Each structure stands twice: as C-alpha cells, then as structure tokens.
Amino acid sequence: MYRVLYRKWRPEGFRDVIGQPHVTETLKNEIKSGRISHAYLFTGSRGTGKTTCAKILSRAVNCLDPHDGEPCGKCSNCIGIMNGNIMDVVEMDAASNNSVNNIRDVLDEVMFTPGEAKYRVYIIDEVHMLSQGAFNALLKTLEEPPSHIVFILATTEVHKIPATILSRCQRFDFNRITPEAIAQRLEYIAEHEGVELSHEGAMLIAAVADGAMRDALSILDRCIGLSDTIDSAVVREATGLAGRDYLFTLADSIRNEDVPLAINTINKLHMESKSISRLCEELTEHFRTLMLIKTMKKHAGELIIMSAEETERAVKQAEKFSLSMIVRCIDVLQASLERMFRGGNNKIEFETCMIKLCSPGLSDDLSSLTARLEKLETIVRQGITVSPKDSSQSRSDVQPAEEKPDDTNAESKTSVQGSSLPEIRPRQSEDLIEKLVAKAKPLDSWEDILDEMKSKSFTLYHRMRGTSAYYADDYILIDAPDDSAFAFLRSDKTRNVLIRDAIRKVTGRSYKIGPYRKPQEDSPAQKTKLDEFIEQISDSDIKLTVE
C-alpha cells in the first residue's frame, strides 16, 4: 500500500527533526543525564513536529541502548513501540476522547507498572479539547505521579489549557519552520524519491506551507501526481495559485468604484461553484499583500506568496491605492466574513460588502469619510473641477480644469478650480527663511522621498537628485546646489504636487516647501564708498612710485 510522504519520511530520531533545535537538543540532554520529567507539554502550530517528537521521546526513554540521547531504533523496545506492539505506550486523541470517563480509564491504568518497557508513556494529542472535568481528573495524577509514568501533552492552542496543568508540565514551544529549512528538506526527499524539484518550486511550496513541514510534504505529494519534474508553474497549478486574476479584477473595481464589474465578477465565480466565503478570505489576503508592499517596499517579498509575475502586477496595483484605503478594505472584508459565519446568504453579504467598498458615500464611518476626503484631495491635485449643479454625477462628468500659463514672476495664488498652491515662492520672505533655518533639522527620510519621486517622475527625480532637506515647523526646506532646481519646480505646478505627494506618503503628513539658505558666517563689515576711493588712490600712488 502506498504511504504518503509525510508518513513515509516522518523522522525516526531527534537528528531528523527539522527547524526545532532548541527542543531536540534539550530533550537529548535530559535523556543522556537521566533527568526525565513526569509531564511534557509540546505546543506550536500544526505540522511543526509536536507529535513526531512525542513519539521519538517515548522510544528514547524506553530504549535499551540509547546513543547520545537518541533511540537506537534496533532494540526490541524501539521496534515494538514503532510497530504498536508494546501496550505501555498509549497515544490518545483528546478531540474524540475528551470526557471525564475517558481520562479516568487512563488513570486507572497509571498505578500499574510497565509490562515490557521502562516507562508507561501517555501521549495526549490536542489536549486543549479535554473538558473541564477531564482536566480536573488529570490534575491529581500530575501533582503526585508514579515514578514510572511520563505524560506528553500536545496542543496547538495552549491558551485553552488551565494554568494548574501548565504549571506542572515542562513546556516546549515549537516554532514555525523557516522556508529555507523546509525547501532544503523537500529537495532532499525529492532526490530520494526520484523526482526533479527546482529550488524555486521548493521555495514556493515552503511559502505556501506557512512553516508546516507536514503541509509542505502533502503539497509535494500533490505536485508529484501532476509531474515528475516540478517547478514553480507546477506548484502554482497544484496549489491553486494559478489563475487568480479575479482578485486583481475585484481590487480594480474597488479602486475605480466600478460596481457592475464587481457584481458581475462575483456572479461569474459563483456560477463556477466558487465558495463565496473563501473568495472573501482570498480578497482579504490580496489586500494584505498590497498593504505589505505599500509599507515594507523591498522587503515585502519575504512575506507574500506570489510568483514573480504576480508580484510585479501587485506592486503596480499597490501604487494606485493609498494605505488608508487598503486598511479600510481589509476592515470591511473581515467584518463581512464574520457575518458570513454567523449565518445568512453569503453571496448577498459579499455583494453588499463590495458595493460598500466601491461606493464610500454609502457609509458614514470614519474610514469611509477618510476615503472620500482622499478622493477629493486627489481631484484637487489633478486640477479637476466638478459642477456644483449635481454633486452625485458620475466620474465621467468630471472634466479637467483648463490650464493657464504659469507666471513664475508673480506670487502663487490658489486657483478657484482647485489647482494646487506651489509652496516654493520666488519672493519668499528672507526673515521667515532665516527663522526656519535657525531651528531646522536634517530630514532623514529624504532618500525615501526621492525614491517615491522616482516612481512618479524620473525627470523630477533627476533634477532633485543630490539635494538634501531639513524640516522645521510645517516646512521642509530643500538644499539644492544651485537655483536651477527651484526654477525647474516653478515652471510647472504639477511638479510641486508630486513633491508634496511624495513627502506626504513617506512622512504621513503634509508640509509646505521652501528653499534652504545655509547660515552665513560672520563676514567683515561692508566697505563704504569713501573706503573704496581711498584704496584706489593708495593703489595709484603705489603704481606711480614703482614707475
């Protein structure tokens, strides 16, 4: 009979356990020194090796010839425990045996000495599922255990276990296994299984497994069913990562406030038997990806599960969203998902959720008002005017304001149509600049602001490259090598808008912009006309004397 990979390649010793050295080394040292506890608690997320280490520990404490704290795997006790022939090692699933009577049956056997092994070992998996009465029944034995008893409790939800139980166990926390460790193990197993597995494919499996070795082996099993040569494309097909364009479509419908597109996409997926609750979860995860790209920039690749092509597409889509809009989408989607689990029609709930996201005007909560204000700010920055006759008109009725020639020699004024106010003024008050310079401090995030400019306008970035900036009060003062940079900014109001927008995205607040004038060192007093005349006469006398 075929054995699935996670059973076939289950570690037989502590040396084979991946990613938990802090657990395996401690257990080996305890076995070597003979300091074996009466109760162990293994906690951690699924697939990280809790049950595996419990089984290895049950063999190690009963092994007739242990080597460096490891079970030999060859003695009668090790072989008997592995085959299930020794009744002194009992594995119990608390999810289906969680009553007081189940625990009492176990406790009735505790007082008997082992028949063949050194210790009677009880492995209780998913121990958090025990009832309160069962925990109370177990507590007395944990307080005063017989010398031949070892309890090994395993759980994924340690917070549900009573403190009285926790305080009587030696606790070991199992960490999620790193993608690199999982990929290395997968490549080793694939080589011995006669399967060609690329490193990119192994890393993608590790990312999807989310730190669980068992999940990674199950995915590899699925991939082997598709092909003996496994790359990232095969992994995407086996895990369902391929063909998720609908997530980008739904996100675009929210960005463009396109309700028909959103509803039609949902209806199409529903007709294709797509789970609506699962669709809501996937869209929430998609916006999480956009949030990470928006906040972590270059370091987001370590935390998102996407192919290179999808990542590039997600980066471009993230540029179209503000961070507050992404966070609002996540909040609304999660609230909708909670209502789905309470009952009702999931399709109607999700359609209502998408209409809310596509129409911020329908909601009066703070996040919706923020989204509407951001939209108005964007319209103002783009120089778009809206007719006051009908405030509910569609986006297609919004027309850009007529461009007017920019007079760089005149004071900048706010346009009636809402065009932006350039902060760099040709005749800015020198007194104000001196006061600001006196308390200005270097702006450490200026390089990040320049990078943001580069994504919007390479020409602007090229002109501003090499500059530095200082901040004081509500101003950011730009220190440029010469005045050409400021002349370039005054020649086009849009460039002013791009700079302020880049500053706001990086710093999180709006600033006015001005030139930075370095403090002048004390210079000698200016010469009067009389002094200059006397110097000229003196020079003439010298010349005459020389002649």
Image: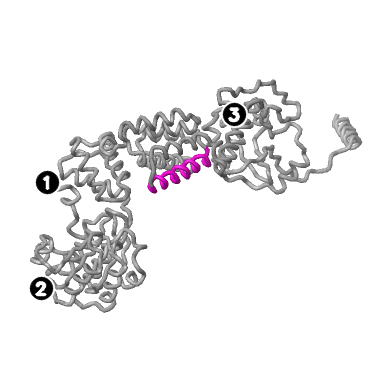
Picture coordinates of residue 544, whole percent (x, y):
88, 30
Q: Is residue 470 left or right of residue 8?
A: right
Task: Give the residue at x 17% y 40%.
Answer: 195
Distance between mark 1 and mark 2 Cα atoms? 33 Å
Q: Is residue 225 left or right of residue 325?
A: left
Distance between mark 3 and mark 1 Cα atoms? 65 Å
Distance between mark 2 and mark 3 Cα atoms? 83 Å
Q: Nearer the viewer, residue 463 or 240?
A: 240
Q: Is residue 26 magenta?
A: no
- In the rendered image, which residue does mark 1 sit on? 2
Q: Secondary structure at mark 1?
A: loop
Range shown magenta: 322-342
- In the rendered image, which residue does mark 2 sit on? 115
Which corner quadrant of the image does residue 81 belong to? bottom left
Within-10-Å neighbours for mark 3: few <14, some 14–19, many 20+: few
Residue 299 seen from this side:
no
Whichever of labels 1 and 2 marks the residue nearer the N terminus, that label is 1
The amino acid marked with disc number 3 is Ser
Q: Nearer the viewer, mark 2 or mark 3?
A: 3
Q: Secondary structure at mark 3?
A: loop
Picture coordinates of residue 91, whole percent (x, y):
19, 63
Picture coordinates of residue 330, whole percent (x, y):
46, 43
- In the rendered image, which residue does mark 3 sit on? 392
Which corner quadrant of the image does residue 14 belong to? bottom left
Q: Is residue 352 left or right of residue 108?
A: right
Whichever of labels 3 and 1 marks the residue nearer the N terminus, that label is 1
The amino acid marked with disc number 2 is Gly
